[in-house]
Amino acid sequence: MSRSTDVRGLIPVLATPFHPDGSLDTSSLRRLVEFSAAAGVDGVAVFGFASEGFTLTTAERAAVLAVVRDALGPTLPIVAGVSATGTGDAIDQCRAAADAGASVAMLIPPFMVKPSPAQIVDFYGAVAGAGGLSVMVQDAPASTGVNLPVPLIVELSKLDGVDSVKVETQPTTPKVGAVIDATAADFLVLGGQNALFVLEEYARGAVGTMPASEFPDLLVPVLRAYQAGSLREAREGFNRLLPLIRFGLQPGIAWSIHKHVLHRRGVIDSTTVRAPAVDADPATLAALDVILDDLGLSGPAR
């Protein structure tokens, strides 16, 4: 039975737990995967921006995928972020991820030297052709500095092996709609930005969302209510979550926020982040506690 490449639904981007000394905490990672699976997610992602993937060594990336592969089960998709700035390195990262159990590569465009549109098409075509994984385009100009206009995404969608896009360009909702209107029906469009506009994105035709990993059990009922046509219930559930969603979007400390929530919920053992990420200050964490108390999340989740 092969692992799916169908990235519809809720695909949380997993935090990468570390011990207090900064080393990889695979026991906490396993619990995080089990927590996600028990919540009813439709797959998971690793090495995304919310994962501190930029801090991981090659060996650590392989170790992360080994844990996720074994803990998630045999069929749900595993999306592996690929952030190499050159074509050869991106292909190597994709092949390594494929060998370690990933089924989809979430690929950002090269960004150290800003590429032309033709170079972006060549880059995605080469990686999709040789990397051994289905490719998701990550449209995240706030992080990469590389803009992917709708006509360029349309061209990428025509490449063999480029099967989906995660749209994170603000405002996300009109771009989601424009990409869906301009691409083939089998090209999958998902949202990101911690699910900040997930209901509006779904209303425009998005088939999935990829937020951080600390609240899948609270977001799954929202998405199921929406898909069942219970729109008021979905909005009410989402509005209850909104303070936590926006709190996890703060530049510089978002990684810390994700981990403090997971720690307070009993999922991971430590809130350690790796530089250049920094820990949130005590006043910020006190404000987070208020949000968690309002949601009834002060106790452990497991």
Image: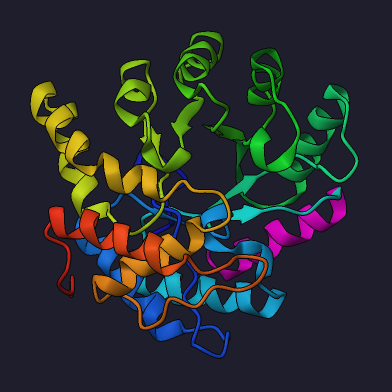
User: Of residues 271 and 181, which is closer to you in this image?
Assistant: 271
**Residue 213 among magenta residues:** no
Residue visible at 54% across and 16% down in the picture: 179
Q: Position of residue 206 (x, y in %)?
A: 39, 25
Which quarter of the figure has residue 227?
Answer: top left
Q: Position of residue 6 (x, y in %)?
A: 42, 41
**Residue 92 among magenta residues:** yes
Residue visible at 13% across and 22% down in the picture: 231
Q: Which residues are magenta?
A: 87-101
Question: From the viewer's perspective, is residue 190 above or below residue 302?
Answer: above
Residue visible at 66% across and 71% down in the picture: 275
Q: Position of residue 207 (x, y in %)?
A: 37, 29
Residue visible at 86% across and 46% down in the picture: 112
User: Of residues 280 and 94, which is closer to you in this image?
Assistant: 280
Which quarter of the figure has residue 23?
Answer: bottom right
Q: Quadrant of the C terminus?
A: bottom left
